[in-house]
Image (cartoon, rainbow, N blue to C red):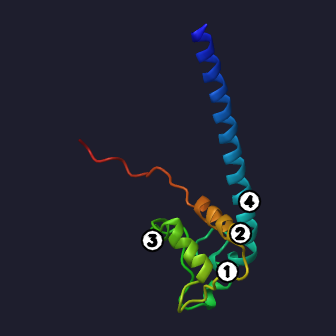
Amino acid sequence: MIRLNILRVMAICTVAILNTWGQVRTAASTSQTQGHDIYERQCATCHGTEGRGDGPQSISLSPRPGSLLSAQISAKTDQELMRIIANGKPRTAMPGWKDSLSDEEQRAVLAYIRSLIRFSRTMTPPPPH
């Protein structure tokens, strides 16, 4: 009897965890979709559709927009990137968006930017042992 109750509790917990995980994934997906839409409207003209810093306006900007795929950007914390999104970058064409985008919209843009970075296996073979 006790074993049966333990199994029931485990099954209920497993279902609850899976439901929560599904909701988190759906929320993240929704955030990335919203972030993509905002990015296309506000950021792609400078940073390019793939975040490489090669948007149509990039050639007329000095300094040129940074690649959002670079190791330097990838290494920044979410808090650092949120500050840049909110406040812009001094001495560049990067404006601050805190007056134009809500905190939620800024987080959605960050989620989308993070989704642009895709790590892949290197084509270089490992060194010999």
Residue located at (73% from left, 81% from top): 100
Q: Is residue 104 left or right of residue 70?
A: right
Q: Which residue is mark 4?
A: 33
Q: Is residue 53 left or right of residue 120?
A: right
| x and y, in percent, of residue 75 in the image | 45, 66
Query: Please, what is the three-letter code of the amino acid marked with disc 4?
Result: Thr
* Dot 3 and dot 4 residues touching (CB under 8 Å): no
Dot 1 falls on a residue whose secondary structure is: loop
Q: Which residue is mark 3?
A: 72
* Dot 1 and dot 2 residues touching (CB under 8 Å): yes
| x and y, in percent, of residue 114 in the image | 58, 62
Query: Please, what is the three-letter code of the amino acid marked with disc 2?
Result: Glu
Q: Which residue is mark 2?
A: 105
Please tell me whether mark 2 or mark 3 is closer to you in this view.
Answer: 2
Query: Please, what is the three-letter code of the amino acid marked with disc 3?
Result: Gln
**Numbered tag placed on residue 97 in the rendering:** 1
Residue 34 found in image quarter: bottom right
| x and y, in percent, of residue 35 in the image | 70, 65
Residue located at (62% from left, 78% from top): 86
Q: What is the C-alpha distance between the residues marked 1 and 3?
A: 21 Å
Q: Residues within 10 Å of mark 4 (few under 14, many from 20)?
A: some
